[in-house]
């Protein structure tokens, strides 16, 4: 079947009509410079895309014009944004380069178009390359928020014109939109855009359900209009009598929100709780916004009974994305629930255009709610912190970001009355890091509503939280399981990286001193030689292994020194000096190292990095320098050894309980009190008859940290001791320490 002939003249007229519509939307009649810039971008885009057509067969230029119109009309962004929207596909799809964009328009335009170009293609949550692309786009939040706003406008136009795509493409793009772009629009406060993206996504993902709800809403429009007019009539009269300037909008809930409620509540369309909603927009001065909103609330509830469980005050406590509004749900005379939203004109603009309005207010220095502005800035700062945690792989990053996009919020207080908003499910440790990185890093517990709670305690709205810190506390790997906010997780990972870097520097110093003794030059060539010989991944990995006891330099053999350079001897006899248990013959899978009395013929030793004792689950690690090191399976170095050097590991088990004693260190935390040290030592020496090697306590701000080294026979003996110590009043935690 041949396509109908293209009417080029009609297309030319349509392009001109759409361009004029863009200019009207941009409201730039007073600025000749703005019109020139937009005309220039339009001409370049028209020329660059002149031979390109969309899947519908329409000229491609329709798309950039439509995106630019969304940016101008629905977001109210500036000339630079409109120019970049017109150019957003040129670098990716045509001969135009970023250098051309910079030369023709400037560096700002180049950077924005560059950010948009990086975010090309379809996002698939299971594809790390596309996840990484999405991450790159979010990085632009740190530099210029207009990139992400234009990208959302681009996505909205693509969804509006999805009819001409193949069904599989429609499904993929709709899924991606629902998975990430709609929640992102919501989090950025673009509620109108979020609603349209959700509805369009549902249209292609659940066409029959979409059609069902859309049909019912369309058929019920006349009835709904009469109902809303009757419902709002007394409110209108009362507001007018009191001299309040207002606008009332009646609307049904969105198709997607109705469908979501039908799914969650397992009900039919007719049983959905509150299909009806009205919005009262007040023409209030900034200083009277809050008072006018509550006055209007009083008028509404004079006529209709409110549901006390459905009152939401986002004027006093704006959402993290800057959203401000007063919500209530009231019962109509006919027995239907109606949601009522009350807000000022300024609040409505923020609610509809979100980050776009916020960005515009900040650029123009206009008046904006301080609390709303601060909340949005705080959220953007948290996104940047999350993005800075570069060690997270892209898929994990998307999961974390998605969690932070969709979560509901709770509000908690400090003892001084300062208010913090956190995602639902946040813990005391999340709160500690939200207050300050240093407080989070030193947190050992908290008092919630004056009761002691652990780090993992989940907070609820209205909690008063006092964080308890200790100077000796450091972030631990298991803390990652205690937090839900990406910001806290990023800070913990950053601290763990710093700690690992410190340990690696110790290993580097040990290697430098050893090389000095052996008259070997401490340079890149010799370090690389060691890395190749010992099969490490990097200098960092080598230094870390030396610091944690995974490599004993003094037992290293099979080398010579020539002019301060490390030379490896290749004779078979010399190779035996390198390792008594050569790594060229790794242990067989069925080999088991038996540890215990009478086994001294085997050259093994207990690793000092984790101090294993009988009863611990252990494994053996064949050392390059000879012999076998026995590690606990939960040793801090176990993951590294088992993942990188699995061929050098072997099963190990204790042969029997023994009368021999092993040194173990324990850390304490708790409330400082008179006689606490005596109580602890009494339990250890008198009650448990355990020998102590060393004990130290340090107290500050009403809490204490302590460490004691004791001699125990096995893990069962150790558990009994820990249980007894936890019974001492004031003792919170008793944890085994890995290092000796």
Image (tube, helix red, strand yellow):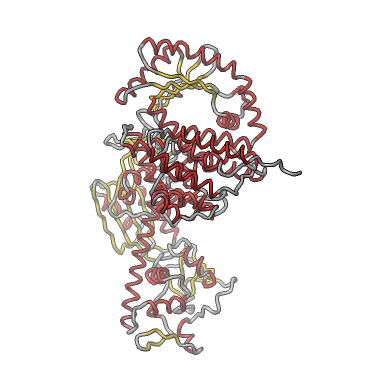
Residue 592, image x, y percentages: 55, 71
Q: In which image quadrant can residue 364 be found?
A: top left
Query: In this image, 307 relative to 374: left or right?
Result: right
Q: In which image quadrant can residue 708 be found?
A: bottom left
Q: Does residue 76 lie above or below 627 as drawn?
A: above
Near-viewer residue (563 or 162): 162
- Quarter of the image that includes the C terminus: bottom left
Near-viewer residue (358 or 450): 358
The residue at the point 49 percent across, 90 percent down is 571
Near-viewer residue (376 or 32): 32
Residue 8, image x, y percentages: 62, 41
Can I make out residue 577 in this image? yes
Query: In this image, 307 relative to 442: left or right?
Result: right
Can I make out residue 402 in this image? no
Q: Does residue 105 lie above or below 646 as drawn?
A: above
Residue 541, image x, y percentages: 42, 69
The residue at the point 26 percent across, 58 percent down is 696
Q: Which residue lies furthest to the right in this view?
A: 1
Residue 111, image x, y percentages: 42, 51
Q: Does residue 701 lie above or below 581 as drawn?
A: above
Q: How many labels does the image show?
A: 0
- Quarter of the image that includes the N terminus: top right
The residue at the point 33 percent across, 40 percent down is 447
């Amino acid at each position: 079947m041949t396509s109908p002939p293209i009417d080029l003249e009609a297309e030319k007229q349509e392009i001109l009509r759409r361009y004029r519509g863009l200019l009207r939307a941009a409201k730039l009649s007073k600025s000749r410079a703005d019109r020139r810039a937009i005309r220039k971008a339009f001409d370049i885009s028209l020329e660059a895309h002149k031979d390109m057509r969309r899947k519908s067969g329409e000229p491609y230029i329709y798309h950039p014009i439509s995106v630019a119109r969304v940016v101008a009309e629905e977001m109210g962004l500036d000339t630079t944004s409109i120019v970049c929207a017109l150019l957003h596909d040129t670098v990716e799809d045509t001969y135009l380069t970023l250098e051309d964009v910079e030369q023709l328009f400037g560096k700002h335009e180049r950077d924005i178009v560059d950010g948009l170009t990086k975010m090309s293609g379809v996002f698939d949550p299971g594809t790390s390359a596309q996840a990484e692309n999405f991450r790159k786009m979010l990085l632009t939040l740190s530099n210029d928020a207009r990139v992400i706003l234009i990208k959302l406008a681009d996505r909205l136009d693509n969804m509006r014109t999805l009819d001409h795509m193949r069904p599989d493409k429609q499904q993929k793009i709709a899924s991606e939109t629902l998975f990430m772009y709609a929640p992102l629009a919501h989090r950025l406060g673009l509620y109108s855009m979020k609603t349209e993206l959700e509805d369009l996504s549902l249209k292609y993902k659940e066409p029959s359900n979409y059609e069902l709800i859309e049909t019912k809403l369309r058929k019920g429009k006349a009835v709904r209009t009469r109902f809303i007019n009757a419902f709002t009539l007394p409110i209108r009269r009362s507001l007018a009598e009191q001299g309040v300037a207002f606008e009332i909008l009646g609307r049904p809930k969105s198709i997607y929100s109705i469908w979501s409620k039908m799914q969650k509540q397992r009900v039919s369309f007719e049983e959905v709780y509150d299909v009806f909603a009205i919005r009262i927009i007040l023409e209030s001065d900034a200083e009277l916004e809050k008072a006018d909103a509550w006055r209007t609330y009083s008028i509404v509830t004079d006529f209709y009974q409110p549901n006390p469980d459905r009152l939401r005050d986002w004027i006093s406590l704006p959402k993290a994305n800057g959203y401000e509004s007063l919500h209530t749900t009231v019962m109509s005379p006919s027995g239907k629930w109606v949601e009522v939203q009350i807000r000022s004109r300024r609040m409505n603009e923020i609610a509809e255009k979100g980050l776009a309005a916020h960005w515009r207010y900040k650029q123009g220095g206009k008046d904006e709610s301080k609390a709303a502005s601060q909340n949005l800035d705080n959220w953007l700062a948290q996104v940047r912190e999350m993005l800075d945690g570069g060690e997270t792989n892209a898929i994990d990053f998307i999961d974390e970001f998605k969690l932070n996009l969709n979560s509901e919020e709770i509000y908690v207080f400090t003892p001084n009355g300062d208010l913090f908003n956190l995602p639902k499910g946040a813990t005391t440790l999340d709160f500690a890091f939200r207050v300050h990185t240093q407080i989070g890093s030193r947190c050992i517990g908290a008092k919630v509503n004056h009761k002691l709670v652990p780090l993992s305690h989940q907070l609820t709205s209205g909690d008063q939280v006092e964080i308890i810190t200790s100077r000796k506390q450091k972030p631990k790997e298991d803390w990652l399981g205690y937090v839900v906010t990406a910001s806290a997780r990023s800070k913990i990972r950053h601290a763990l990286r710093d700690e690992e870097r410190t340990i690696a520097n110790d290993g580097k110093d040990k290697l430098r001193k050893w090389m000095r003794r052996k008259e070997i030059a401490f340079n890149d060539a010799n370090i690389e030689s060691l890395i190749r010989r010992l099969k490490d991944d990097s200098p960092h990995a080598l230094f870390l292994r030396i610091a944690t006891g995974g490599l004993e330099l003094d037992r290293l053999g099979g080398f010579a020194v020539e002019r301060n350079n490390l030379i490896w001897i290749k004779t078979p006899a010399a190779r035996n000096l390198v390792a008594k248990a050569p790594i060229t013959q790794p242990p067989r899978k069925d080999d088991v190292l038996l540890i215990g009395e009478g086994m001294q013929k085997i050259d093994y030793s207990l690793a000092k990095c984790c101090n294993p004792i009988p009863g611990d689950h252990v494994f053996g690690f064949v050392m390059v320098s000879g012999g076998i090191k026995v590690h606990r399976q939960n040793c801090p170095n176990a993951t590294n050894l088992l993942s990188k050097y699995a061929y050098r590991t072997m099963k190990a088990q204790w042969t029997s309980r023994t009368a021999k004693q092993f040194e173990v260190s324990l850390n304490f935390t708790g409330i400082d009190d008179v006689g606490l040290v005596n109580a602890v030592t009494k339990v250890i020496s008198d009650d448990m008859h355990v020998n102590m090697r060393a004990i130290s306590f340090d107290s500050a701000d009403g809490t204490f940290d302590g460490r004691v080294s004791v001699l125990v026979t096995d893990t069962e003996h150790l558990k009994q001791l820990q249980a007894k110590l936890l019974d001492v009043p004031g003792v919170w935690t008793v944890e085994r320490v890995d290092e000796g």
